[in-house]
């Protein structure tokens, strides 16, 4: 079930909707089916230091060191 952005041509409302196969989307504001499907802007994954360090700690706990550089792996294995 894909998630699409729609713009209602009847009332001007823009919204996001999960579309099931065979069901025509309906505007949640006015109930119209006169909708234009919009191109959704992709969102880049977050790259904050907290997220990266959390992922690294979890990887080390699980025994794989793929998130670490070769120099960092050497320090961890000592």
Image: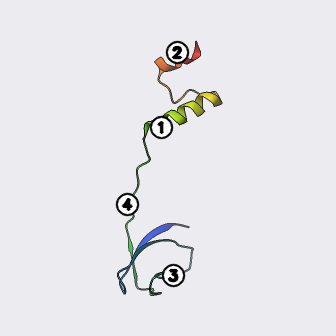
Instruction: Give the Cα separation between the discs numbered 1 and 2.
Output: 21 Å
Instruction: Give the Cα separation between the discs numbered 1 and 4.
Output: 25 Å
**Residue that numbered label 2 is attached to:** 75
Q: Are marks 1 and 2 in contact (CB under 8 Å)?
A: no
Q: Residue furthest right?
A: 62
**Residue that numbered label 1 is attached to:** 50
- Label 2 sits on a secondary structure element that is helix
Relative to 26, is 48 above or below? above
Residue 54 is situated, as x and y percent measured from the top left of the image, at: 54, 35
Task: Name the N-terminal-most of marks 1 and 4.
Answer: 4
**Residue that numbered label 3 is attached to:** 24
Left or right position of 71 against 13:
right
Q: Are marks 3 and 1 in contact (CB under 8 Å)?
A: no
- Crowd band around label 1 with a 10 angstrom C-alpha radius: few (<14), some (14–19), many (20+): few
**Residue sitting nearer the eye, 38 or 27:** 27
**Quarter in which the N terminus is drawn:** bottom right
- Crowd band around label 3 with a 10 angstrom C-alpha radius: few (<14), some (14–19), many (20+): few
């Amino acid at each position: 079930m894909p998630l699409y952005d729609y713009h209602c041509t009847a009332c001007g409302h823009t919204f996001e909707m999960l579309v099931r196969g065979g069901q025509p989307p309906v505007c949640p504001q006015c109930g119209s089916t006169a909708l234009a499907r919009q191109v959704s802007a992709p969102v880049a994954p977050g790259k904050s230091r907290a997220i990266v360090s959390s992922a690294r700690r979890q990887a080390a706990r699980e025994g794989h060191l793929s998130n670490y550089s070769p120099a960092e792996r050497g320090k961890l294995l000592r």
